[in-house]
Amino acid sequence: MRWLLIIPFLIAPVWCAESNSLLVLAPHVEIHGIDVSHHQKQIEWDTVTAHENIGFAFVKATEGSNYCDSMFCYNWGALQRLGIKRGAYHFFKGYGCGYEQACHFLSSVDMVNGDLPPVLDVETLDGTTPEDLATELHVWLKTVEIQLGVKPIIYSNQNFFERFLADKGFEEYPLWIARYSAEKPSLEEGHFWSFWQYSNEGCVEGISKLVDLNVFPGTTEMLEELSYKQYMRP
């Protein structure tokens, strides 16, 4: 597994979806995964699974209120065929309507039992105020949660999250935090991450471009607890 960076977890906090609590794990309990979009071109997923130990993969599905990633359907189908735990993410446009963007995502992604929760990727203000952005993010999150019966994951880099989102009422949502460092993310009190994107320069057999590397600090069973279950839908 030449692409993995070994990250030591002495105490690894992770979100427990059912109890809204934190679990403290034994050292070095972790699952590694990647996230991709059309920027990685057409991925040879059979080659990836033959040479790399991929525990999960997030793929870009949509952006704004009308854009669909050109490789989403291909990636989404290949991951299901190969039995790789998969998740879909939406890149949020801060100047757009949260409800319209949520409807666009929901109409573009067919989820099945065992998929990872939907991800809301937020990285820029796009000329809006932090308050207006947070309002529309909450609309997106609630719309998707009501439709699917699972809490979405919020993705952001540590700096953006702490500056613009940490005090905006997102404590109940699992977090996926980007921090390209040997130091794991350290968030303000009351916030705990469930996924860490620790590099954007991974080399993976079967993918021609550099790829983001991620880690989930928990067991397979804990990752399953976080996942979408259709029977939970209202």
Image (cartoon, rainbow, N blue to C red):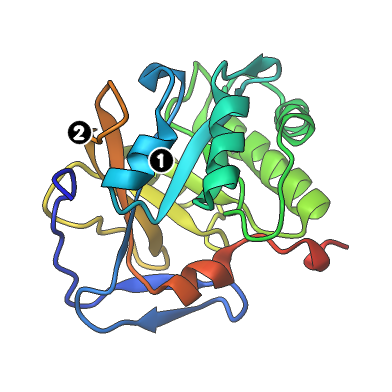
Q: Determine whether the residue tagged by mark 1 lies in a helix, strand or loop.
A: strand
The one nearer the camera, 92 or 57, is 57
How busy is the neighbourhood of tag 2: few (under 14 within 10 Å), some, or many (20 plus)?
some
Residue 102 visible in the current orientation: yes
The image shows residue 36, relative to residue 194, as above or below, that is above
Q: Position of residue 77 (x, y in %)?
A: 61, 36
Residue 91: in sight, yes or no?
no
- 21 lies left or right of 76: left
* Residue 203, label in figure: 2
Q: Secondary structure at mark 2?
A: loop
In the rendering, at what x and y percent does residue 119 appear?
Answer: 56, 44
Quadrant of the drawing holding the C terminus: bottom right
Mark 1 and mark 2 lie on one chain; the one further toward the N terminus is 1
* Amino acid type assigned to the residue bearing label 2 in the image: Cys
Q: Position of residue 194 (x, y in %)?
A: 41, 61
Q: Residue at x 66, y 34 (%)?
A: 136
In the image, 84: left or right of 17? left
CA gap between label 1 and label 2 equals: 22 Å
| Residue located at (63% from left, 60% from top) | 114
The image quarter in which residue 159 lies:
top left
Residue type (three-letter) at the residue carrying disc 1: Ser
Give the residue at mark 1: 156
Q: Position of residue 163 (x, y in %)?
A: 36, 41
Residue 69, relative to residue 194: is it above or below? above
> Is 76 situated left or right of 162 in this image?
right
Q: Residue at x 53, y 31 (%)?
A: 75
